[in-house]
Amino acid sequence: MDLSSRTDEMGAARSAPGLDARPLIEARGISKIYTVGEQTVRALDEVTLSIRLGEFVAIMGPSGSGKSTMMNLIGALDVPTRGAMELDGRNIAMLSSDALADLRNRTIGFVFQQFNLLPRTNALRQVMLPLLYAHPRPADADALARHRLEQVGLKDRMDHYPSQLSGGQQQRVAIARALVNNPKLLLADEPTGALDSKTSEEIMALFCKLNSEGITVVVVTHEPDVAEYAKRRVLFRDGRIVEDIAQPGFLGRAAE
Amino acid sequence: MNVFDSLGIALTALRANMLRSILTTLGIIIGVASVIVMVAVGTGARSEVDRQIASLGSNMLVVFPGSTRVGGRAGGAGTRLPLSERDMQALREKIPGVVAISGLLQGNGAIVYGNANWTTSLMGIHDQFNEVRDWAVIEGRGFTPNETRTAARVALVGKTVIDKVFNGADPIGATIRVLNVPFQVVGVLDSKGQNSFGRDQDDVVMIPMSAARGRIVGRSKLVNDNVGNIHVKFDAATDLAEAQAQMETLLRQRRSIKAGTEDDFNVRNLSEFMRARTSALTTMGWLLAATSAISLIVGGIGIMNIMLVSVTERTREIGLRMAVGGRRRDILMQFLVEAVALCLLGGLIGVTIGVATAAVVALSAQWPILIAPNAILMALGAAALTGVVFGFFPARRAAHLNPIDALRTE
Ligand SMILES: Nc1ncnc2c1ncn2[C@@H]1O[C@H](COP(=O)(O)OP(=O)(O)OP(=O)(O)O)[C@@H](O)[C@H]1O
Ligand SMILES: [Mg+2]
């Protein structure tokens, strides 16, 4: 019931794209500077980026251009050296470590290139993991996890361990895990990097479907084919945004 | 995330590295096992000493002839004045609080029953000996005062003697030859087990003092009524130290010992003597306690070490848990619970080994097996505490990892 009501709310937001919705992600002049020995590396250099609820953004750029660094800041896993990063209206630099944990738990779902599944843990328990850290903890965690696994097409793989699943299936488990706590934002850093092209297409089609249901999706990718699915494309180079364009002909349209 | 979730994660992690987990807990295992053995052996030994003290008879003082001085001015053994029936009589009459009194002549000798032959401990006693020493006659009867006086040919036999020579026959009324003189068995003595020197106290035949005199020990040239040692039992109200002083004064008078000269006799409280030996056992208990404390500390360092390894190995997992919403305290709790679970695992193994060892020790020393549930709880508590203390630093280190650094670790 909770699930469907959330979907309706999202659907409403999406059906009025003209009215500028409150930005979900608001980066204002953020820099991330690493110091290694004598050297300083500007991984991000005065980046300003705003992403609204319901968007589907592909972040592209050459290796080392700061894509992952940007994703970590968007995901509240890290804080910028300079500038303000607001997530869902809150400046992450101001939040305590507990508040950041709750923000990641409630608002954000992560999907990683290397899946990052727990060893010796079956698919169902992998998916339940974020619910174990939720406050308050849902009583029907088991049912919520099953629902998400069904949604990603793994109805009959609930008891499988990571070693018993294909790469694509493992990534689906990771996606189910990212979705289980009803996040507003799905962050995926090269989610198809370890998968073949057919499986990549399936995963991207799944993202399109989720986005059409109202979830904001941000995907980092090297592959232009993959970026085709997004409605908007942001290009990074040397820690700066060099291109930010809407893709009216995005592939995801087919799913809608 | 509650403690049960953490416990589930901890057990999964421990099971994945079963051998490593058990080897790691070796220090804890030894620590806990030695706590259990220490407490069990300590209480077992103490109860054994108590039993021996009780088997000496309670509220009892013993007078030995001869000085306490070893060597020294006192003349050779032949010149020392034995204790006599008259000394005994005087003690009985002049010292307040005496309940029962008896002499004791002790030696060894052969006894024969039918064609069975056995060398045993022989005791010459007065009729009140059984009362003085709380050494009951469980079948038949003890000696009468008249039998003690008239050198009657009657005997009391211990359980071991019955087993060795009677071969199932009824001892009461049977005639045995003690040092080639026929005696009639009139009573069977209660079993007393081993004494503190490991000697079997049931391997004994008792005969009246007057019948034993000159047989068990040679006749004294100085007195014709030697009674060996005098055992005196007092009523519960008597202060034994005071009684001891009175006895010494009385005997010095009777034996005309001049002021400034040493006693030629010696009054002792044997249970005090036994208790002094218990304190040696207590010292040993403390040593064992120190050993177990040290092995718990060493074990704790082992736990800390392996937990640091575990944190390092699972850095990515920690990063992931943080990325999906794990708070610092959740991570801290997870690793703390894992350390405690590891220590409790070692604790349980240690308890098993400790209980088994204590049982073996108790069986071989013929003590009762005394393993207090408190000792087990205490030992497990100590193990758990070790887990908390030594698991805290690694757990804190895990909890304070930066999520992004943790996720990036290879
Ligand atoms: N922890 C760090 N310490 C020092 N330098 C870092 C750190 N993390 C990233 N960098 C540097 O920041 C820059 C941007 O790195 P980032 O990982 O964001 O690149 P990327 O665009 O994701 O590259 P790729 O496509 O290869 O994943 C790189 O030059 C990298 O060396
Ligand atoms: Mg990257």
Image (cartoon, rainbow, N blue to C red):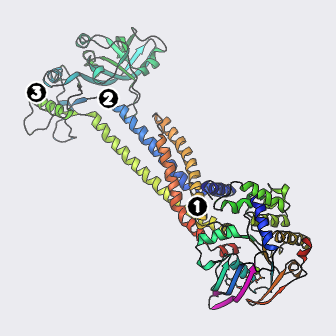
Chain of the residue that carries numbered disc 1 in the rendered image: B
Tell me the quadrant of ligand 1.
Answer: bottom right
For residue B387, above or below residue B402: above
Q: Position of residue B403 (x, y in %)?
A: 65, 73
Name the disc covering residue B56, or none.
Answer: 2
Asked if the residues shown at circle 2 and circle 3 are in contact, with their CB atoms under 8 angstroms apart, the answer is no
Viewer can see residue A113? no
- Residue at (45, 53) in percent of width and height: B291
Q: Which of labels 1 and 2 is toward the front? A: 1
Viewer can see residue B257? yes
Q: Which of labels 1 and 3 is toward the front? A: 1
Question: Do discs 1 and 3 share a chain?
Answer: yes
Disc on the earlier residue, 2 or 3: 2
Name the disc covering residue B254, or none.
Answer: 3
Instruction: Count residues near mark 3 (Cα–Cα under 10 Å), then give few for <14, some for 14-19, many for 20+.
Output: few
Indicate the quadrant where residue A250 lies: bottom right
For residue B334, above or below residue A201: above
Q: Which residues are magenta?
A: A33-52
Q: Position of residue A137 (x, y in %)?
A: 66, 58
Chain of the residue that carries numbered disc 3 in the rendered image: B
Q: Is residue B264 left or right of residue A201?
A: left
Mark 1 Cβ inside 8 Å of ligand 1: no
* Marks 2 and 3, how far apart at CA: 27 Å
Question: Dominant secondary structure of the magenta stretch?
Answer: strand
